[in-house]
Amino acid sequence: MRAVVQRVSRARVTVDGSVTGEITTGLLILLGVGRDDTSAVAAALAERIANLRIFEDDHRKMNRSLLDVKGYALVVSQFTLYGDARGQRRPSFVAAAPSEQAKNLYQEFAETLRRLGVAVVTGVFGAMMSVELVNEGPVTILLDSDKTF
């Protein structure tokens, strides 16, 4: 799994002109699912993100997690995180999971965050979405379950 995690003061996702998910302080998580990903990978990444210390403490150091600040998570599926454009002009997406597998693991990821105590809203899996955000910091973290970065 791959995730782009952005610390936000607000974010929302719109599908066909209707807002389907909106948050205030928290994280916008763009989530890509790979072919070899499993439920265990989804749960581990969700726990890692919930506990990632990227919110400022009273001394302005990134020392608090999403759980610490009682922030929200907006989780948006994004298969293009598995796009491979090395040596070509059109990305290949063969490393991305098939739709049904990706949808199941995307839902499991969001459910794990909920079980950890995070208020979660989502985009619409597979839909053409518009995502708006105000990135605070800016803070953007790239995570990969294979730890390639």
Image (cartoon, rainbow, N blue to C red):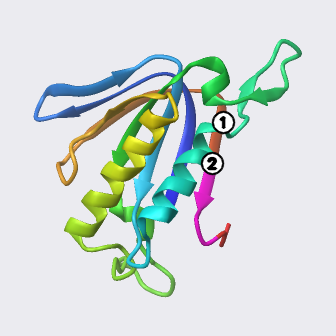
Quick one: quadrant of the C terminus? bottom right
| Image quadrant in which you'd find residue 74 | top left
Residue 49: percent from left, percent from top: 59, 44
Q: State the extent of the magenta-drawn residues as a range.
A: 141-146
Q: Is residue 86 above or below residue 118?
A: below
Q: Residue at x 19, y 48 (%)?
A: 128
Residue 12: percent from left, percent from top: 34, 27
Q: Residue furthest front?
A: 115
Q: Which residue is mark 1?
A: 139
Q: Earlier in the sequence, mark 2 or mark 1?
A: 2
Q: Is residue 7 left or right of residue 88?
A: right
Alpha carbons under labels 2 and 1: distance apart: 16 Å
Q: Residue at x 49, y 87 (%)?
A: 87
Could you say which disc has been placed on residue 44 in the image? none
Check disc 1 and give the amino acid type.
Val
Residue 70: percent from left, percent from top: 57, 19
SS category of the residue bearing label 2: helix
State whether the magenta stretch is mostly helix, strand or loop. Answer: strand
SS category of the residue bearing label 1: strand
Check disc 2 and give the amino acid type.
Arg
| Image quadrant in which you'd find residue 57 | top right
Q: Is residue 83 left or right of residue 64?
A: left
Camera-side residue of 128 and 146: 146
Crowding around mark 2 (Cα neighbors within 10 Å: few <14, some 14 to 19, many 20+) is: some
Residue 91: percent from left, percent from top: 37, 76
Q: Which residue is mark 2?
A: 48
Crowding around mark 1 (Cα neighbors within 10 Å: few <14, some 14 to 19, many 20+) is: few
Camera-side residue of 83 and 54: 54
Q: Residue at x 59, y 38 (%)?
A: 50
| Image quadrant in which you'd find residue 83 | bottom left
